Image (cartoon, helix red, strand yellow):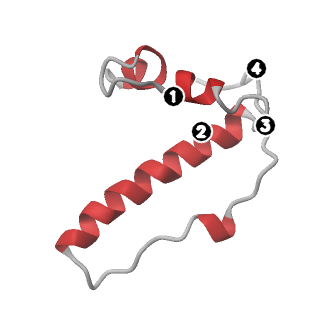
């Protein structure tokens, strides 16, 4: 996870970071929902790269099964 800090906070990897992007939506969506959307966006992007090599494989549909309403926990008791 050596690149995680750059992705989440500093933006040194791709000129933006998830924290800065989330600030644009923080009044309308929970951080928990935002992180799920960001992860699904990354998977959709990489799936597109895969499909360019293997066009006979199917696309992934995250949108139709997405459920809003996750709450953002400030702690995680019992986690490692």
State the CA–CA distance, disc 1 to disc 4. Answer: 18 Å
Residue 28 — which label?
3
Q: Earlier in the sequence, mark 3 or mark 4?
A: 3
Q: Are marks 3 and 2 in contact (CB under 8 Å)?
A: no
User: Residue 29 at x, y = what percent?
Assistant: 75, 38
Packing grade of label 1 (10 A; few <14, some 14-19, many >=20) is: some
Q: CA distance from mark 1 to mark 3?
A: 16 Å
x, y percentage for residue 72?
Answer: 76, 31
SS under mark 1: helix
Read off the residue under disc 2.
35
Mark 1 or mark 3: whose residue is earlier in sequence? 1
Are discs 1 and 2 less than 8 Å apart at CB? yes
| Disc 2/disc 4 C-alpha distance (Å) | 14 Å
Quarter location, residue 75: top right
Query: What is the C-alpha distance between the residues marked 3 and 2?
Result: 14 Å
Query: Is 25 displayed left or right of 13 in the figure?
Result: right
- Check the image and name the residue furthest to the front: 24
Which type of secondary structure does the marked residue at label 2 adopt?
helix
Residue occupied by mark 1: 18
Mark toward the viewer: 1 or 4: 1
- Mark 1 or mark 3: which is in front? 3
Mark 1 / mark 2, whichever is N-terminal: 1
SS at circle 4? loop
Q: Position of residue 19 (x, y in %)?
A: 55, 22
Report, in whole angstroms, how far the alpha carbon at label 1 lies from the one at label 2.
8 Å
Q: Residue at x 69, y 37 (%)?
A: 32
Query: Could you tell me how far apart the alpha carbons at marks 3 and 4 are, in whole angstroms?
Result: 18 Å
Q: Quick one: 58 or 77, which is closer to the camera? A: 58
**Can you tell which mark lies on residue 4?**
none
Characterize the local packing of mark 3: few (<14), some (14-19) or many (20 or more) Cα atoms within 10 angstroms: few
């Amino acid at each position: 996870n050596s690149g995680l800090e750059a992705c989440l906070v500093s933006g040194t990897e791709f000129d933006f970071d998830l924290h800065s992007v989330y600030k644009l939506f923080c009044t309308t969506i929970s951080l928990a929902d935002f992180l799920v959307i960001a992860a699904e966006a990354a998977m959709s992007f990489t799936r597109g790269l895969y499909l360019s090599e293997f066009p006979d494989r199917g696309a992934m549909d995250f949108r139709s099964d997405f459920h809003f309403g996750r709450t953002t926990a400030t702690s995680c008791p019992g986690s490692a």
